[in-house]
């Protein structure tokens, strides 16, 4: 869930960007989603396909991808994600390792030398430690609860279980591509960490990208995923001016890849259909000095979304989408 019970940001605050929305940048994405999306989503998708653009009707403006961006450079579509996850670092020795008598073989793969911090939202023990997690912490612009319990599905599957599972799947995929992956917690502490510590872990790791994994808890009928981007804030220890731009790039790439990998549509209840929302009230974003986004993978309180969130197969697709977004952002 969102980190607190405050209402979602007004629509006017969401996804205001001078750039075309992420789904307008690669029209093939819409085709891929169309192949996967339920009929109910066909209208949204078909609009993109038929106009070949975003809501404004402009011609598509594909954003040039780095030359090293291999994840989507060849065949687009659903098979792309599978192909990328099926190509871990080659086992064949290259000249570097063949000639190296170095003590430790360097990590291989497109993310070798890169550090990614994954933040599994909440903690399954938080509900037993309400006094600890209710403690107020400084988020620079404000003070806020250390952490929250998170939400659950109607059948009792905890958001904190979901976030840890998706995070672990994501770690395995990232490590197969050579990344160093740091978790903010791994069921190795009874509660927390607090949101300020979650941010600090990413900062101290000098992470190249940070992703906080969540699922939302709003009323049934609200469906889909959204990625939360940091707003420009300055106050106390909070100064996001340097991360707003790269975080949007990271978030757009994750949103596009997540839609493609899972077949889920952007949230129908906020973000104006872009799957992107900007917020200035989250300590985990405000205190970050590294490119960082949150992803709300779906709505645990909606039966159709919950059916996906409770499926291990779907969670693997979610992890693939998040991973491919990170790989694209890091130019792997
Ligand atoms: Zn959450």
Image (cartoon, rainbow, N blue to C red):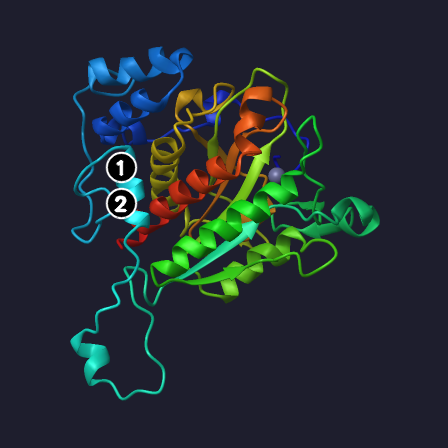
Question: Residue 299: x, y in percent?
Answer: 57, 27
Compared to residue 77, the image places residue 160 above or below, namely below
Question: On the rendered structure, is 89 left or right of 292?
Answer: left
Number of the label disc, if any, that sits on residue 210: none
Q: Quadrant of the C terminus?
A: bottom left
| Residue at 32 percent of width and 51 percent of height | 327
Compared to residue 137, the image places residue 114 above or below, namely below
The answer for how far apart the CA atoms under marks 1 and 2 are is: 6 Å
Question: Assess mark 1: CB under 8 A from ligand 1?
Answer: no
Compared to residue 161, the image places residue 7 above or below, namely above
Q: Nearer the viewer, residue 166 or 296?
A: 166
| Residue at 49 percent of width and 21 percent of height | 11
Q: Quadrant of the N terminus?
A: top right
Label 2 crowd bin: few (<14), some (14–19), many (20+), radius 10 Å: few
| Residue at 25 percent of width and 23 percent of height | 31
Question: Circle 1 — which element?
Answer: helix
Q: Is residue 208 visible?
A: no
Q: Nearer the viewer, residue 241 or 277?
A: 277
Question: On the rendered structure, is 4 left or right of 178?
Answer: right
Label 1 crowd bin: few (<14), some (14–19), many (20+), radius 10 Å: few
Question: Assess mark 2: CB under 8 A from ligand 1?
Answer: no
Number of the label disc, if any, that sits on residue 83: 2
Are the residues flagged by discs 1 and 2 in contact, CB closer than 8 Å?
yes
Question: Circle 2 — which element?
Answer: helix
| Residue at 68 percent of width and 31 percent of height | 5
Which residue is denoted by mark 1 in the rendering?
A: 79
Q: Nearer the viewer, residue 114 or 76?
A: 76
Question: On the rendered structure, is 14 left or right of 17?
Answer: right
Question: Residue 72: x, y in percent?
Answer: 23, 42
Question: Residue 218: x, y in percent?
Answer: 63, 24
Question: Residue 160: x, y in percent?
Answer: 65, 43
- The quadrant where ligand 1 appears is top right
């Amino acid at each position: 869930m969102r980190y607190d019970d405050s209402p979602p940001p007004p629509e006017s605050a969401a996804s205001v960007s001078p750039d075309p929305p992420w789904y307008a940048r690669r029209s093939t994405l819409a085709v891929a989603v169309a192949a996967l999306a339920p009929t109910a989503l066909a209208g949204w998708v078909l609009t993109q396909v038929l106009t070949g653009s975003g809501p404004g009707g402009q011609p598509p403006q594909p954003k040039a991808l780095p030359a090293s961006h291999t994840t989507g450079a060849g065949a687009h579509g659903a098979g792309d994600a599978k192909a990328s996850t099926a190509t871990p670092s080659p086992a064949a020795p290259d000249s570097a390792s063949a000639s190296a008598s170095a003590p430790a073989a360097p990590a291989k793969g497109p993310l070798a030398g890169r550090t990614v911090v994954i933040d599994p939202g909440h903690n399954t023990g938080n509900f037993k430690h309400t006094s600890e997690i209710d403690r107020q912490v400084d988020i620079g612009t404000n003070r806020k609860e250390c952490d929250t319990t998170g939400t659950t599905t109607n059948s009792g599957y905890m958001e904190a279980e979901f976030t840890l599972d998706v995070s672990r799947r994501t770690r395995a995929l990232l490590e197969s591509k050579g990344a160093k992956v740091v978790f903010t917690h791994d069921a190795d502490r009874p509660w927390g960490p607090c949101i300020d510590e979650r941010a600090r872990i990413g900062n101290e790791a000098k992470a190249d990208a940070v992703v906080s994994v969540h699922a939302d808890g709003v009323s049934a009928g609200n469906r889909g995923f959204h990625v939360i981007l940091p707003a420009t804030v300055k106050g106390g220890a909070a100064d996001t001016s340097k991360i707003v731009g790269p975080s949007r790039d990271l978030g757009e790439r994750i949103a596009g890849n997540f839609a493609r990998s899972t077949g889920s549509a952007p949230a129908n209840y906020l973000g104006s259909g872009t799957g992107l929302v900007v917020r200035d009230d989250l300590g985990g974003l405000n205190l970050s000095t590294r490119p960082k986004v949150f992803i709300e993978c779906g709505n645990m309180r909606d039966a159709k979304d919950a059916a996906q969130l409770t499926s291990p197969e779907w969670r693997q697709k979610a992890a693939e989408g998040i991973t491919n977004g990170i790989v694209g952002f890091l130019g792997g």
